[in-house]
Amino acid sequence: MNRKGFTLIELLIVVVIIGILAAIAIPKFANTKEKAYLASMKSDLRNLVTAEEAFFADSVKYTSTVGA
Protein backbone atom coordinates (compact mmCIF):
# COMPACT_ATOMS: atom_id res chain seq x y z
CA MET A 1 0.00 0.00 0.00
CA ASN A 2 1.52 3.30 -1.15
CA ARG A 3 0.12 6.18 0.88
CA LYS A 4 0.71 9.72 -0.22
CA GLY A 5 0.52 12.50 2.32
CA PHE A 6 2.43 14.46 4.88
CA THR A 7 3.67 13.13 8.17
CA LEU A 8 3.01 14.91 11.44
CA ILE A 9 6.67 15.97 11.66
CA GLU A 10 6.56 17.55 8.20
CA LEU A 11 3.42 19.49 9.10
CA LEU A 12 4.95 20.67 12.39
CA ILE A 13 8.08 21.87 10.59
CA VAL A 14 5.95 23.87 8.15
CA VAL A 15 3.95 25.41 11.01
CA VAL A 16 7.18 26.39 12.81
CA ILE A 17 8.60 27.97 9.64
CA ILE A 18 5.39 29.94 9.08
CA GLY A 19 5.50 31.07 12.72
CA ILE A 20 9.09 32.28 12.37
CA LEU A 21 8.27 34.17 9.18
CA ALA A 22 5.24 35.77 10.85
CA ALA A 23 7.34 36.78 13.86
CA ILE A 24 9.74 38.54 11.50
CA ALA A 25 7.10 40.20 9.31
CA ILE A 26 4.53 41.43 11.85
CA PRO A 27 6.77 44.00 13.61
CA LYS A 28 7.74 45.51 10.26
CA PHE A 29 4.10 46.19 9.42
CA ALA A 30 2.99 47.13 12.95
CA ASN A 31 4.02 50.79 12.68
CA THR A 32 2.77 51.31 9.13
CA LYS A 33 -0.38 53.08 10.36
CA GLU A 34 1.68 55.52 12.43
CA LYS A 35 4.01 56.22 9.50
CA ALA A 36 1.02 56.94 7.25
CA TYR A 37 -0.45 59.27 9.89
CA LEU A 38 2.84 61.17 10.19
CA ALA A 39 3.13 61.47 6.41
CA SER A 40 -0.41 62.86 6.28
CA MET A 41 0.39 65.41 8.99
CA LYS A 42 3.52 66.55 7.15
CA SER A 43 1.51 66.97 3.96
CA ASP A 44 -1.15 68.98 5.78
CA LEU A 45 1.50 71.26 7.28
CA ARG A 46 3.06 71.82 3.84
CA ASN A 47 -0.38 72.75 2.49
CA LEU A 48 -0.87 75.17 5.38
CA VAL A 49 2.48 76.83 4.67
CA THR A 50 1.56 77.16 0.99
CA ALA A 51 -1.79 78.74 1.87
CA GLU A 52 -0.13 81.15 4.32
CA GLU A 53 2.44 82.19 1.73
CA ALA A 54 -0.31 82.77 -0.85
CA PHE A 55 -2.23 84.90 1.66
CA PHE A 56 0.94 86.83 2.48
CA ALA A 57 1.58 87.47 -1.22
CA ASP A 58 -1.90 89.00 -1.55
CA SER A 59 -2.14 91.02 1.66
CA VAL A 60 1.49 91.47 2.85
CA LYS A 61 0.64 89.95 6.24
CA TYR A 62 0.07 86.51 7.65
CA THR A 63 -3.28 85.37 8.98
CA SER A 64 -3.87 85.93 12.67
CA THR A 65 -6.24 82.97 13.00
CA VAL A 66 -6.70 79.73 11.15
CA GLY A 67 -10.31 78.72 10.61
CA ALA A 68 -12.45 76.58 8.41
Image: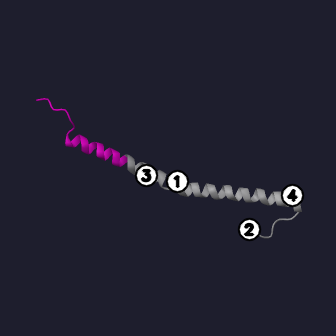
Instruction: Please identify, in this view, whether the residue under mark 3 or under mark 2 is nearer the observer.
Output: 2
Name which quarter of the figure residue 52 lies in: bottom right
Residue range (magenta): 1-20
Question: Which sits in the foreground, 13 or 6?
Answer: 6
Q: In this view, does 1 lie above or below 43?
A: above
In the rendered structure, the answer to whether residue 29 lies left or right of residue 9 reads: right
Q: Residue at x 76, y 58 (%)?
A: 49
Q: Quadrant of residue 55?
A: bottom right
Structural crowding at the residue carrying mark 4, measured as other residues with C-alpha within 10 Å and reported as few (<14), some (14–19) or many (≥20): few
Q: What residue did someone put label 4 on?
A: 57
Q: Does the magenta stretch include residue 6?
A: yes
The amino acid type found where label 3 is placed reads Ile
- The percent coordinates of residue 8 (x first, y second) are 20, 43
Q: Earlier in the sequence, mark 4 or mark 2?
A: 4
Q: Report if the CB atoms under discs 1 and 2 are less than 8 Å apart.
A: no
Q: Is residue 1 left or right of residue 53?
A: left
| Residue 35 as seen in the image, left or right of residue 42 | left
Callout 1–callout 4 Cβ contact below 8 Å: no
Q: Earlier in the sequence, mark 3 or mark 2?
A: 3
Which is more N-terminal, label 4 or label 1? 1
Q: In which quarter of the image is the C terminus?
A: bottom right
Give the residue pinned by disc 1: 32
- The nearer-to-camera label among 4 and 2 is 2
- Tag 1 secondary structure: helix
Disc 2 target residue? 67
Q: Residue at x 34, y 49 (%)?
A: 19
